[in-house]
Image (cartoon, helix red, strand yellow):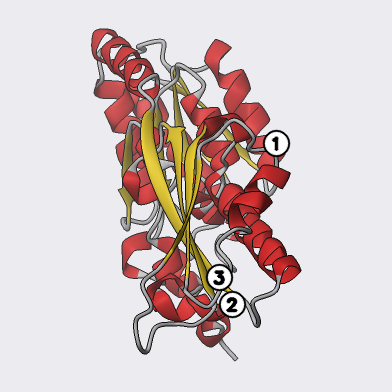
Amino acid sequence: MKNNKCLLVLHGPNLNMLGKREPEIYGTLTLETLNALICRKAEELGISVDCRQSNHEGVLIDLIQEAESKYNGIIFNPGALTHYSIALRDAIAGIAVPTIEVHLSNIYGREDFRHLSVIAPVARGQICGLGHQAYLLALEAFANESTQDQAAWVLEKKINLSREKTRAVRGAIDVAMNDEQEILQATTELLREIILKNNIRKEDAVAVIFSVTADLNAAFPARAARQMGWNDVPLFDVVEIDVPGALPRCIRVLLLFNTNKGLHEMAHVYLKGAIALRKDLQTPDISQNKKG
């Protein structure tokens, strides 16, 4: 029975290589076969589907933005962009079309860097680890959802996204010597990396709190923040207690900012020798996972 629903099925980067790329992980189905299965299931459920694939983030964003006037839902496999594309996350958050995130493999059973999805917090749901069945189950979920239920979820999504919270990210970097220029450069590098990884705008910042070890001049980190344009944001510089065995010549920062992100989306940044303070934040060496 036709229910007049039309869905966008969106495949992200490298999914055009299905059947060839790591079949032991992603299976042997080609993208063409996968789309045929999706279309057949959609026909059984009485809904229409439009299957699209792109390796380009901007193209995917355009398709998502255009979905509001065309589709009742999106089934999206963002590929590797799942783990870091704030731009895709914002595109999905910005439309009143529910999205179900799908993955062929179990992203939580693979490398650590694949465990984070920046898409999931703004998605209707997530299905992973079931191969092509993930797409078919997402189709059934949309087909069985009433118009009233979908409208209620869209309203709830808009309300939740409008509630900004103050979040905090931590960072640290060390310097070779107690030199004004070196401290200014290191602090600027640290702040820029935190801003980049957390997609922070200058006007989002609430406060910036620095602490430096006793072997450094505490007057300089806040100056670096002022030079970056935070002239109306409270800044604090403090000197840490000198603890034997602590990392020397270290600058730490606690940056508070307003955001709709969840706690698990915060990216803490530790650079140079300061990574020793948080070894769990080191990027995995993916070269070890490559097959020779």
Q: Which residue is mark 1?
A: 59
**Which residue bears the numbered disc 3?**
173
Which tag, 2 or 3, sits closer to the chain's start? 3
Name the residue that disc number 2 marks.
Answer: 272
Viewer-proximal residue among 19 and 81: 81
The image quadrant of residue 53 is: top right
Distance (Cα) linking label 2 and label 3: 6 Å
Residue lying at 65% horizontally and 81% vertically, measured from the top left: 177
Mark 2–mark 1 distance (CA, rounded to whole Å): 36 Å
Q: Where does the image place residue 107, in percent across and percent down from the top left?
A: 37, 61
Q: Are marks 2 and 1 in contact (CB under 8 Å)?
A: no
Q: Nearer the viewer, residue 177 or 65?
A: 177
Question: Looking at numbered disc 1 in the image, what kind of residue is underneath it?
Answer: Val
Say above or below: 204 vs 130. Answer: above
Give how far across and how far down residue 184 sits, in percent.
Answer: 69, 61
Q: Which mark is residue 234?
A: none
Q: Is residue 207 left or right of residue 32?
A: left
Q: Residues within 10 Å of mark 1 (few under 14, many from 20)?
A: few
Q: Residue at x 39, y 19 (%)?
A: 162
Contact flag, marks 2 and 3 (Cβ < 8 Å) = yes
Q: Can you say which quadrant of the picture contains the C terminus?
A: bottom right
